[in-house]
Image (spheres, grey):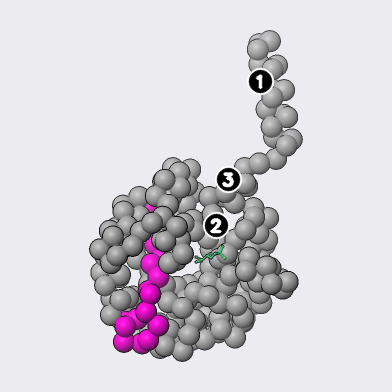
Amino acid sequence: MKFFIDTANLAQIKEANDLGILDGVTTNPSLMAKEGISGTENILNHYRAICDIVDGPVSAEVLSVNYEDIIEEGKKLAALHKNIVVKVPMIKDGIKAIKWFTDHEIQTNCTLVFSAGQAILAAKAGATYVSPFIGRIDDSNWDGIELIEQIVNVYTAQGYMTEVLAASIRTPLHIVRCAEAGADVCTCPLTSILGLLKHPLTDLGLEQFLKDATKL
Ligand code: E4P
């Protein structure tokens, strides 16, 4: 399973990249706003800065919601860098646009996916990635991991090439469960990635080893 970081914060992207386990980045308008990035030129420059840090797919989300505008915006984003993946919402015009991008060899990430039916449409349109939001499903009292399992099963049964990109990760356990469920990619906040490091027995064991090492 590939690891993407889900943030627009350059320091966090660099920290995850320096770990040597980072495969890519996802952003969204809320994450860009959180970093205070606004205005077309600043937004484009920020994507360039992310691509300079990470040598892997960088999802850049369109702000448009109608077909022609999504295409125009996506073309500009894709022209920024070979690693840019155009992130398009799961709406009717979004699906049409994803098909256009597929036909023009532009990579896409179909975002805001909450059902297997939506994931089938994204795959039929040729999306490179489909992003089910498992944390938001859990938040609304459903089971996000079950959706990942269902989409993985459908894609395997049908031979779809679209990669399942588990999004809206809240905890290190989400990452483990996504790996078990067969997700191709997990996009996570830095806290969840670093949370995978932690186990109290590791800390206790290391403390004892370091204590005993002073006797050597
Ligand atoms: C994915 O691409 C989204 O940017 C993200 O995972 C959404 O996460 P949230 O539900 O924590 O906002």
The amino acid marked with disc number 2 is Cys
Q: Is residue 31 magenta?
A: no
Instruction: Point out the tag, 1 or 3, that comes first from the N-terminus.
Output: 3
The amino acid marked with disc number 1 is Leu
Q: In the rendered image, which quarter contains the C terminus?
A: top right
Residue 164 picture quarter:
bottom right
What residue is drawn where x is 38% and y is 67%?
60
Residue at numbered disc 2: 188
Residue at numbered disc 3: 194
Residue in the foreground of this view, choosing between 56 and 115: 115
Whether residues under marks 3 and 2 lie with C-beta atoms below 8 angstroms apart, the answer is no
What residue is drawn where x is 72% and y is 29%?
205
Instruction: Point out the tag, 3 or 2, that comes first from the N-terminus.
Output: 2
The amino acid marked with disc number 3 is Leu
Question: Element type at marker 1?
Answer: helix
For marks 1 and 2, give the CA distance.
32 Å
Closer to the camera: disc 1 or disc 3? 3
Q: In the rendered image, which quarter contains the N terminus?
A: bottom right
Closer to the camera: disc 1 or disc 2? 2
Residue at numbered disc 1: 210
Instruction: Provide the residue span drawn in magenta.
Output: 54-71
Whether label 3 lies within 8 Å of ligand 1 gets the answer: no
Tell me if 58 is positioned left or right of 188 in this view: left
Q: Which mark is residue 197?
A: none
